[in-house]
């Protein structure tokens, strides 16, 4: 591992009583953390603070949040941050309830963000109409996003699948190589049509269904050479309190 590079894994830590906000505020000025994993209670206010941090942070490359109830407030803040952040390559918001506004904000961010390579919004209870409109607009112009996972968002349905299909048809230089709509109620016929346009007008594009962690790993290895050597430092809540409170 290169000197000065640290990654943090806050797993199932109790992040109530403002601790999540303190972590986010620290991230705003941190210049060493490249990979941050948070699994547990990270609520709307913490999400709002995290969004503010991402607007300023120029070091973080991978952010993974699991089981965090971000809601409209947290989701919207992260979406707004993605419009300005130019260093984040991989974003996981799995099992993070985003709300109607939050989901739409993430979709809107993809219309302006030019650096994000991977986006995972699995089990996020995305509201179909608001998210579909923004995602469709994004995929019709975005030329950098290579992997999109929308697993187990049962409200998306056929209309969202159709929006993705037409957006990829419209995009003249689509970068999207991997897409997973498992358990999102997109009909198999629509999925087949999407598959047929994945290589559309792009020699880089190829289609893999469903997405696999091994494939995603190889996608980022060239950009993140420390994938195999990254150090995960498991801080418990008490240690975090000593550092930030």
Image (cartoon, grey):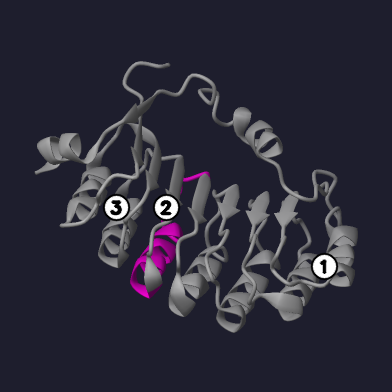
Q: Position of residue 88 (x, y in %)?
A: 47, 45
Cα separation, mark 3 vs mark 1, equals 35 Å
Q: Which residue position is annotated with label 3?
A: 53
Residue 145 at x, y = what percent?
64, 52
The residue at 80%/47% (across/down) is 208
Label the magenta part by its dominant secondary structure. helix
Position of the C terminus, as image quadrant, is top left
Which mark sits nearer the N-terminus, 2 or 3? 3
Q: Residues within 10 Å of mark 1 (few under 14, many from 20)?
A: many
Q: Give the CA separation, mark 2 to mark 3.
A: 10 Å
Q: Is residue 189 above or below residue 63?
A: below
**Labelled pair 3, 1 in contact (Cβ < 8 Å):** no
Tell me: 223 left or right of 31: right
Q: CA distance from mark 1 to mark 2?
A: 27 Å
For disc 2, the neighbor class at 10 Å (few under 14, some 14 to 19, many from 20) is: many
Which numbered marker is on residue 92?
Answer: none
Residue at x-position 83% and y-position 46%: 206
Residue 87 visible in the snapshot: no
Total numbered circles: 3
Q: Which mark is residue 169?
A: 1
Q: Secondary structure at mark 2?
A: loop
* Picture coordinates of residue 151, whole percent (x, y): 65, 60
Question: Can you identify the residue that label 2 sits on?
Answer: 85
Residue found at x 49% / y 59%: 95
Q: Earlier in the sequence, mark 1 or mark 2?
A: 2
Indicate the quadrant where residue 239 lies: top left
Evaluate whether residue 142 shows in this view. Answer: yes
Q: Where are the magenta residues, as a range?
A: 72-89
Describe residue 188's horizontal placement relative to residue 243 as left or right. right
């Amino acid at each position: 591992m290169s000197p000065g590079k640290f990654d943090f894994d806050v797993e199932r830590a109790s992040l109530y009583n403002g601790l999540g906000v303190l972590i986010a505020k620290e991230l705003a000025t941190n210049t060493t953390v490249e990979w941050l994993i948070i699994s547990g209670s990270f609520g709307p206010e913490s999400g709002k603070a995290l969004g503010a941090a991402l607007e300023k942070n120029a070091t973080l490359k991978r952010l993974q949040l699991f089981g965090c109830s971000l809601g409209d407030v947290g989701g919207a803040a992260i979406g707004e941050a993605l419009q300005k952040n130019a260093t984040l390559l991989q974003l996981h918001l799995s099992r993070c309830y985003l709300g109607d506004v939050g989901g739409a904000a993430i979709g809107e961010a993809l219309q302006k963000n030019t650096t994000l390579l991977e986006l995972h919004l699995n089990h996020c209870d995305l509201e179909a109409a608001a998210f579909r409109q923004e995602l469709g607009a994004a995929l019709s112009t975005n030329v950098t996003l290579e992997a999109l996972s929308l697993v187990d968002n049962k409200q998306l349905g056929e209309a969202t699948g159709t929006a993705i299909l037409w957006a990829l048809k419209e995009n003249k230089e689509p970068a999207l190589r991997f897409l997973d709509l498992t358990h999102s109620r997109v009909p198999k016929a629509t999925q087949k049509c999407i598959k047929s346009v994945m290589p559309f007008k792009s020699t880089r594009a190829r289609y893999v269904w469903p997405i696999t962690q091994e494939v995603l790993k190889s996608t980022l290895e060239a950009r993140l050479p420390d994938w195999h050597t990254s150090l995960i430092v498991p801080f418990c809540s008490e240690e975090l309190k000593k550092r930030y409170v």
